[in-house]
Image (cartoon, coloured by chain):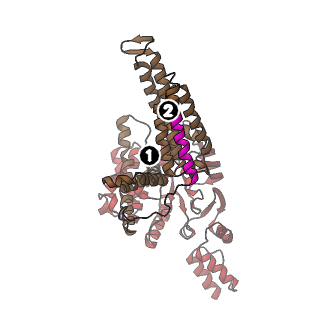
Chain colours: A brown, B red
Amino acid sequence: MIRDITIGQYYPADSLLHRLDPRVKLFTTVIYIIALFSFKGIVGLALITGFLYYVIKISKVPFRFMTRGLKAIIVLVVITSIFSLLGTPGDIVFWKWKSLQLTDAGIINAVLMTIRLVYLILGTSLMTLTTTPNQLTNGLETALAPLNKFHVPVHSIAMMMSIALRFIPILIEETDKIMKAQMARGADFENGNLIQKAKAMVPLLVPLFVSAFRRAEDLAMAMEARCYNGGEGRTKMKPLKYTQEDYNAYGIVIGFLVLVIIAANVVPFPQ
Amino acid sequence: MSIILDKVNYSYSEGTAYHVQALKDINLKIEDGEFIGIIGHTGSGKSTLIQHMNGLIKATSGGIYFHGQDIYDEDFNMKELRSRVGLVFQYPEHQLFETTIFDDVCFGPKNLGLDKKTVELRAFEALRNVGFPHELFYQPPFDLSGGQKRRVAIAGVLAMKPEVLILDEPTAGLDPAGRDEILGLISQMHKELGITIILVSHSMEDVAKYVDRIIVMNQGSVMYDGVPKDVFRQYKELEAVGLAAPQVTYLMHELQEKGLPVDVDATTVEEAKESILAAFR
């Protein structure tokens, strides 16, 4: 039941996107988000759609995997688009009631907002689907390494992130097992009112916390036994190295951003 | 007639890259009062199989019948099924949560909606049935030893008075003395309380001594189903799938090859001893 959560899930496949350096993918995601929130006009939208379609195609990840991630945010999308639909003042007013109004700008805004959110989820989930959590934190650590000079504990943050990510599936599986063990003793997690439901969580949360603390202690012990003492002087078994493919990808992505910016200035219509 | 599984299939994460068919066409009939051992190595589907028996996992296809009733019927009472088919999971840590051991054992019967007196009486009985020392009843369950935690976990399910008790690897992580104690306890419950016992294990040694029927699981299918000595006679095939017959079986076969007229079907040390002594008489 809880196995179906896709956020942060990795989809194993052999594609160009999977092979790319995680730093390239992080950079691409940032550029993509900038492009997504700065584009103007139909040409810019077409460019972004084309880019998204192209990367999804070469990722070899089935499209329904990404749409499953969309299901989780559908409520958010609906609410934000309703707000921008009814709350934006514009030139042509179709309908008005108290402070709510339906205008031309509102419709355009709502459509754009929906497209932006959906594309945002598709693009970012594509990154996590093609990058293992380890690669991702590794990439972050290397990319943010300059911050060390300003006494930002980059290594510790990256380590915490990778441990946290690593433990998500373990804790999900554990929750599943505990739920089953308590259901076998007649516990009911689905029926009842809010108070009863909250009460039903106690037999689930207590064993979960006990086991999480035990795991944390074991992990700390195991790390100390291997003489872990932070990032200083620590070498990597697989240091990140750029290949020609990565440089090409950087070129394509920067070209993409430049095109989107040009399109926004040349054909800024419709808004 | 107790539990019938008819062509049960189950797959995890169907339609994704992680698709695994965990169970393939399982047909089983479990009678009242049997003492069954389910054996298979890790990933053979034995844990998945037992979770079907109390409705925790719904089969992808196929039917399961409890006393002739289809458990997937709309109006079937799942909660009642779970009280009548008790399932004790491998790790007692996954179910202990109350502040005292006694309260924890009360959790099961309380969920059945019984009144306070009956609940406490049942918890008391259950703890006594698993031979739990009285002076520890009101201690927190988290500081107990592995073997004692397991006893509390078994009592927690036993307090619901199940007709069938399924135990998933009840001896995992216990030392030999603790293992013998728990297995002895289970066997005693089978005899004295007359409940059907299904014991899941990956160790032949564990089950050979106690059970009267063995089901061998391999890659999601039932490979053998029969009395221990018939199953152990296939010890070469068992080895091929990563399982082993009890050491006694190997010893008896070797002795026979060396020309000693012993009974190769002996499954326990006791039987083997008798047979070897008889051969020298």
Residue B124 visible in the snapshot: no
Chain assignment, label 2: A
Q: Reply above or below: A62 against A269.
A: below
Chain assignment, label 1: A
Q: Which callout, 2 or 1, points at the residue further toward the start of the chain?
A: 1
- Dot 2, crowdedness within 10 Å: few (<14), some or many (≥20)? some
Residue B253 visible in the snapshot: yes
- Most frequent secondary structure within the magenta stretch: helix
B115, A64: nearer the viewer: A64
Q: Reply above or below: B22 against B209.
A: above
Q: Which mark is residue A186?
A: 1
Q: Position of residue A184 (x, y in %)?
A: 47, 49
Q: Position of residue A258 (x, y in %)?
A: 51, 36
Q: At 40% from the left edge and 44% from the top edge, which residue is drawn?
A: B111
Please, what secondary structure does the residue beneath circle 2 have?
Answer: helix
Left or right: A103 in relation to B218? left
Residue hosting label 2:
A261
Please, what secondary structure does the residue beneath circle 1 have?
Answer: loop
Residue type at numbered disc 2 = Ile
Residue type at numbered disc 1 = Gly
The segment highlighted magenta reads: A232-261
- Dot 1, crowdedness within 10 Å: few (<14), some or many (≥20)? many
Q: CA separation, marks 2 and 1?
A: 60 Å
Q: At 56% from the left edge and 28% from the top edge, which residue is drawn?
A: A43
